[in-house]
Amino acid sequence: MKCPYCAFRESKVIDSRPADEGNSIRRRRECLACRKRFTTYETIESLPLVVIKRDGSRQTFDKAKLINGMVRACDKRKVPLPVIEQIADEIEQELQGALDREVTTEEVGEMVMRRLQDVDEVAYVRFASVYRQFKDINTFMQELTKLLNGKNVE
């Protein structure tokens, strides 16, 4: 780590402690040349996730978009925002843990639907209707029948 005061490349760590709710480590350092102290933060480098859209285009994964979609599905339902944020965090962690750096919108949508079905059935149906692009009332009724019969969503 280069000293911000004299640019000397060696320093010693004086103190380390967790920061940002345990997502990073704050290190207090002292330059071995000028003896001035400075702070650095160490975080895990996460590789970017790429989402392949239906039209074949690619976008960087955006958790905010995921949350917004679930918020719209949960509109006027008693689903607290922290629950929606927790679902988004779980999905992001699952995707980060996977070996693939690319994921399709279909895979992300299925992950959301599996979780929403357990949280609120109306929100699940709303999300499914947009995500699966129901073409007619029969397709919509088939999804409702699956839900009513307690079958797993495909």
Image (cartoon, helix red, strand yellow):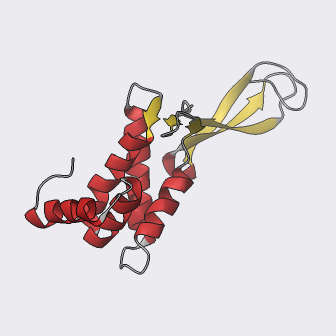
Above or below, 149 relative to 99: below
Q: Quadrant of the N terminus?
A: top right
Image check: 97 left or right of 13? left
Residue at 13 percent across and 67 percent down: it is: 148
Residue at 45 percent across and 60 percent down: it is: 85
Above or below, 147 relative to 20: below
Relative image position of residue 58 (x, y in whole percent)? 57, 34
Residue at 52 percent across and 44 percent down: it is: 23
Relative image position of residue 98 (x, y in whole percent)? 37, 30
Q: Nearer the viewer, residue 64 or 13?
A: 64
Q: Nearer the viewer, residue 148 or 102?
A: 148
Relative image position of residue 19 (x, y in whole percent)? 57, 48
Relative image position of residue 57 (x, y in whole percent)? 57, 34
Residue at 56 percent across and 33 percent down: it is: 48
Above or below, 12 relative to 138: above
Q: Nearer the viewer, residue 47 or 116?
A: 116
Asked where in the image residue 44 lies, by quadrant, the reply is top right
